[in-house]
Image (tube, rainbow, N blue to C red):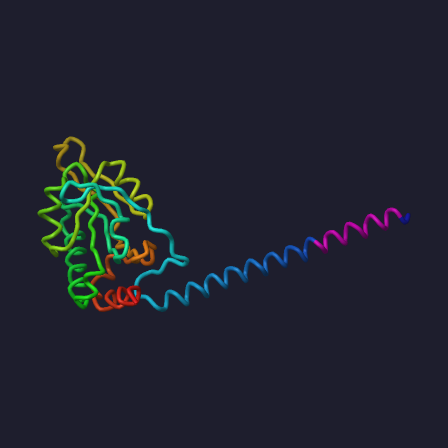
Amino acid sequence: MTYAVKAARGFGTSRLRSFIVAGALLLALGASFVFSRYTAYQQVQQKFYGQALVPDSQAYDFKLVDQEGHSFRLDQLRGKLVLFSFGFTHCPNVCPTTLSDLGKVYRSLPERERAKVQVVFISVDPQRDKPELLKNYVPYFDKSFIGLTGSPEQIAQTAKAYGAYYEKVHTPGEDPDVYFMDHSAFIYLISPDSRWKLIYNFDQLHQTQKMVGDIERILG
C-alpha cells in the first residue's frame, strides 16, 4: 500500500472521528439547552396555578369595538392586569360559566387590587353580537366587565394571535340565522406591562383562590 493511499485513509478516518466528536458535542449542547429551558420553565411554573408562558411574550395589541360602539385597543388597558376569553352571547353553558367564574375571582380580590384588574369578553360571533347586545350581556356578570366585537377580519386576527379556535356550525337546510359557534375555552392573563404571562383552561376557573393567588403574585 502506498504512502498516499495510507494518508488518504488516515485522513478519512480522522474526518470521521471529527464528525463524530462534533455530532456528540452538538447533541450535548442541545441536551443542555433543552434541560436549561425545562429547568427555567419549571422554576417559573411552580410559582403559578395557570399555565405559564416561558418565556412570556408581548401581548398582541388587538383593535376591536367595545360595547359602547367605540374603537378599543388592548393598549388602552396598559397598567392593568387583563383577563380575557373568547366566546359568544348565545353560548348555552361554557361562556356564561366562564364569565360567572371570572366574576367570582374578580370579587374575591381586595378592593385596591380590583382597580388594577380588567376582565374582557371577546365575541367570535360578530353577526349576532352587536355592541348593544354585548352591553346587555357582559356587565350582567359584573358591571366592570367589558364586551368586545369587531369585523370578522379583526376577530380572526385577534384569535390567531392568541392561538384561539372558533368555527360556525350550521345544519344545511336550516334557517341561516340558527347556528352554533364551536370555540376554544381558554382564559388569557396579560400583565400590566402588556406581557402575555399565563393561560387557563376552562376546568381551572372554579379554583377561585388559586387564580386570585396568581393575580396577586403578578401584581406584586
Foreground pick, 173 / 91: 91
68 magenta-colored: no
Q: Tag count in the figure?
A: 0
9 magenta-colored: yes
Task: Indicate whether 10 appears above or below 32.
Answer: above
Foreground pick, 123 / 31: 123
Check the picture and name the quadrant holding the C terminus.
bottom left
| Main secondary structure found in the magenta portion | helix
**Residue 213 image-quadrant placement:** bottom left
Considering every residue shown, the one lying at the far right of the view is: 2
Indicate the position of residue 86 as horizontal and vertical percent values. Answer: 23, 48
Q: Residue at horizontal 50%, vertical 63%?
A: 35
Indicate the position of residue 44 as horizontal and vertical percent values. Answer: 39, 65
**Residue 204 image-quadrant placement:** bottom left
**Magenta residue span:** 4-18
Foreground pick, 183 / 87: 87
Indicate the position of residue 161 as horizontal and vertical percent values. Answer: 33, 45
- Left or right of 46 in this view: 101: left
Foreground pick, 116 / 148: 116
Indicate the position of residue 91 as horizontal and vertical percent values. Answer: 15, 47
